[in-house]
Image (cartoon, rainbow, N blue to C red):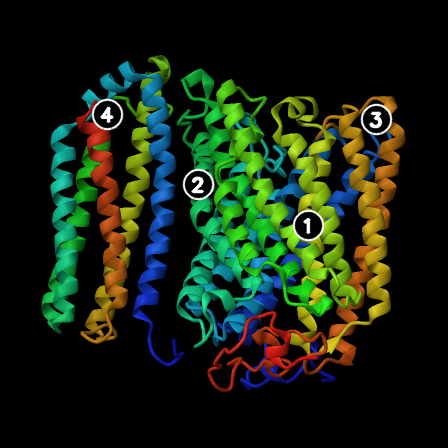
Amino acid sequence: MSQETATAEGGFWSDSGKTGIGSWIFSTDHKRIGLMYLYCVLSFFMVGVLLGVLIRLELIAPGPTIVTAQTYNALFTVHGVVMIFLFIIPGIPASFGNLVLPIQLGARDVAFPRVNLFSWWLYVIGAVIVLVSLFTGGGAPDTGWTFYVPFSARTTTNVSLAVFGVFILGFSSILTGINFVTTIHRMRAPGMNWTRIPLFTWSLYATAWVQILATPIIAITLLLVVTERVLGLGLFDPSRGGDPIMFQHMFWIYSHPAVYIMILPGMGVISDIIPVFSRKPIFGYKMIAFSSLAIAAAGSAVWGHHMYTSGMSDLGVMVFSFLTFLVAIPSAIKVFNWVSTMYKGSISLEAPMLFALSFILLFSIGGLSGLILGAASTDIHVHDTHFVVGHFHYVMFGGTGFAFFAAAHYWLPKYFGRRYEEKPAIIGWVLMFIGFNVLYFTMQVLGMEGMPRRYYDYLPEFARLNFVATVGSWIMVAGILIVLWNLWRGLLKGEPFTGNPWGGASLEWSIPTPPPTENFEEDPVVTHGPYDFKGAGVP
Amino acid sequence: MSHLEKDTFGAKLGMWLFLFTEILLFGGVFILYSVYLTRYPKEFGLGGKQLDLVYGATNTVVLLTSSLFAAMSVTAIKRGAKTATLTLLGGTIGCALIFLFIKYLEWSAKFHHGIYPNSPKLIAGPPGESIFFGLYYLATGLHGIHVIIGSVLMAWTAVMVQREVLHAGDNVTLENVTLYWHLVDLVWIFIFPLYYLIL
């Protein structure tokens, strides 16, 4: 242990007998690939957090504060690109999905292990290209993460390379999706019928379909941006007969479903954690599984709600508004089922559960503010304001981000064989939760009052709330640092974590800790559901 | 599924899912086509008449023939006929190269007439015409890239057939590459009428 940096041992960490970096970056073991994804997405998460803090610092007072306007444009663009394409889209599916999904199905690996490794390589290559684009050519892109034309076709910053990097990342995402769908259809252990699949894996199934069906659209759209810049095809250029609105449609045909790629796995994490820490079978298993598919399906038809002010027929606005409201139904089904699961349960408030509970609250606030944006009349008022930024962060960070940390506290000890300390985890969570609300709720209020998003400067009357929001960002970052430091220290040096201390009933809790490379010594035969604690024989 | 058997059904399922993504990728181009066709029907009509029907029709025949060879190669390998499989794969690749060569002739002729992306002639002309040829180069270019990728994949499988990695008992890779090739063919079957025939 002394000469190795990784102090985790046993199971897949050592049973293949291979060591060194080659045994990781060329490994087809889904657990190693999952961990490599985890390290990558966490690194990019920290980069994104740093950029976010800088944005907030710039906005702490009106006028120039720490950076120039051009740098500020690059900051919010790169913050968005890094957080969305490098952290939150691959975040839960590629890291925890890879770690957990095959085991939850009773499989020894995913259907295409080499494709899985290839998709990680594509992710790394795409990420490197995005990073290179920040420091070469005309400098970091300044278009916002949405790359809207005509500006993205004309700006002198290095948009072409950044967009090409995102194209590669999309390819990686597609391959993960194909792998998961095939694995779920073909690799289930005997007895693992569709109603015994844990809800986390169910959510990944819905996610994978969105990854497969939506990502190609962003691929062609981003290729078109590159061709606009390099070849001058003029397909989005009004002076040549092109229509920039077509870019917006094609961009959001992917990028709206993409928010379900981001949130669905988070909902799956919560669906797995709530019953375990409430000591009660999940309420409405089938409805939760079905609602994941319903969200994926309905969510694919609502992209127009990003474009109410872009120029669309009134009929179009009404249809998209109606469809948007439909998405609220399966989302609410999930929330009600989680709450019903806890009713009369024996709730234990450990770190994974605290993150899961805050997910429910923050996601509900985010979801409800989404309805304000989905209704055309109110959207016109708050369109392109900080209200949108606040809403988005409530859903994405309060939702998926908190679910990511819930998953980390819930599953990582299983893979490292060691656990974090409870107290710092809870202190970190409290700080994150308080800071989060101070930051993003204030943003929503600012937006209501009319502060536009992406602006470098603002009117003096917004100064007080901007100051409050920036202070909130410091509290939240302090919480994040404590949580990550505690995880890092605990997983490498903490108390041993063996057996099934949480008392989970899904298959990952039935195998040794850390799991061996082959996951199961013998192919398992599944005889009970994932939340049938009696059937699994856990108290 | 036991982990010891090779899951050929699963392999094909994965390939079909990938084909969906390809269809959606081209779907973006077809959506732009339909929107801009409604907006500029006259210019699209004029643009379409400038495309060379002989080149387009010949290429359709060439690509359909290549697809036939590809399909026959799957039958051949299942019967254990290695030489026939290799010959048919060679035929497929040969047709692909002919297709690309004809495409090259067609594009060169267009370039010669000053019709290429961002050309002074297109910039000076009506907006709809520029859009039409923009889409024409986009669709045929993207399709051409797929023809190249498909040919490389065919050559790769041919090597594996030669080395008997793929044989009568295990040939799902060849079948998958053939599926991909049929998709490339199928996309052309839509491009050809939309750009060369109906306008």
Quick one: label 1, few (<14), some, or many (20+) residues within 10 Å? many
**Which amino acid, mark 1?**
Gly
The chain to which mark 4 is attached is B
Mark in front: 2 vs 1: 1
Q: Residue B112 carries which label?
A: 4
Q: What element carries label 2?
A: helix
Q: Which of A31 and A337 is in front in this view?
A: A337
Q: Which of marks 2 and 4 is in front?
A: 2
Residue tagged 2: A217
Q: Which mark is residue A399?
A: 1
Residue occupied by mark 3 = A63
User: Which kind of residue does numbered mark 4 sit on?
Assistant: His
Depth check, mark 3 against mark 2: the one in front is 2
Q: Nearer the viewer, mark 4 or mark 3?
A: 3
> Mark 1, mark 3: which one is toward the viewer?
1
Q: Find the distance from the CA under tag 2 to the CA under tag 4.
A: 33 Å
Discs 2 and 1 lie in a common subunit: yes
Classed neighbour count for the residue bearing mark 3: other residues with Cα under 10 Å, few (<14), some (14–19), many (≥20): some
Measured along the vertical axis of the image, is residue A97 above or below residue A446?
below
Residue that sits furthest to the right in the current view: A464
Whole-number angstrom distance, CA of label 2 to CA of label 1: 25 Å
